[in-house]
Image (cartoon, rainbow, N blue to C red):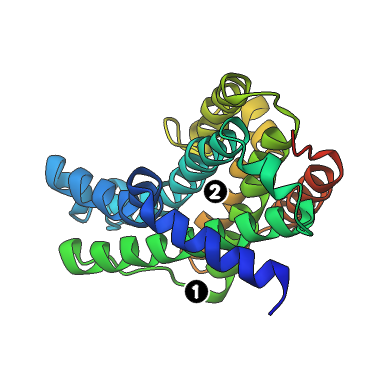
Amino acid sequence: MSALSRLTGTEARLFLREPVGAFFALAFPAVLVVVLGNAIPAFSEPSADFDGERPINLYLPVVLALAIGTVTMTSLLGVLAQYRERGVLRRLATTPVKPSALIGAQLGVNVAALLVGSALMMIAAVIAFGSRGPDNRPALLVAFLLGAAAMTGVALLIAAVAPNARASAGIGTLVYFPMLFFAGVWTPGPMMPDTAQRIADFTPLGAASQAMQAAWSGDWPQPLHLAVTAAYALITCALATRLFRWQ
């Protein structure tokens, strides 16, 4: 068994033992959808304003983007900051484990957890509100995985260069809320000013959100959005590996 697979298994067990991180990755998307659907009855009813579509179907891709942003910019950053402050990384530095193995393990665990949580969210939406689910499932899977990998890479890069937990949390917060805006959490993409829409095309979460919305409607995402998320994933993970410091 390779060092990466052993470390991934260990990180997965530690992840499941941490209730806050596990909740946000596995349960938060489903809970949010159920709460919104019950708090706003019209949210789950066909609307003439949306050509008979349920508003919840239009918002589910945004919930996926919100889950990706929340897990990566809060939970993942918090875990790695704790590792640094508690000396876990210092102890790992005395072992044959390489930074690339730790980064690969965190990437695998967090993307897998987000995938499970998103599947649970879609099941909850179908059961509770009769959501039709995504029309282009393969495209949604590709867009989701690229978006999750891109945002995980951004979080890993921040964790790699931040000197302590306070700096990591501060940088994460500065990144988190603008990312949510460009993902359409508060203002749907088509309602954004033209300049904001153009900026969103080149942010990892904004591109991922638009790609998932296209897939949900049955289309294939724009090549630009897939290219942007793939580039963020590759570049940030490579930089995180290169710049990572054990101490």
Question: Percent position (x, y) of residue 103?
Answer: 70, 53
Question: Percent position (x, y) of residue 99?
Answer: 77, 51
Dot 2 alpha-carbon crowd within 10 angstroms: few under 14, some 14 to 19, many 20 or more: many
Number of numbered discs present? 2
Residue 156 position by quadrant: top right
Residue 245 position by quadrant: top right
Q: Is residue 167 above or below residue 247?
A: above
For the residue pair 43 and 2, the one nearer the viewer reads as: 2
According to the image, label 1 marks what residue? 137
Question: Image quadrant for the N terminus?
Answer: bottom right
Element type where label 2 sits in the image: helix
Residue 83: tell me if it is visible: yes
Res. 209 mark? 2
Dot 1 alpha-carbon crowd within 10 angstroms: few under 14, some 14 to 19, many 20 or more: some
Question: Image quadrant for the C terminus?
Answer: top right
Q: Is residue 52 above or below residue 132?
A: above
Res. 234 mark? none
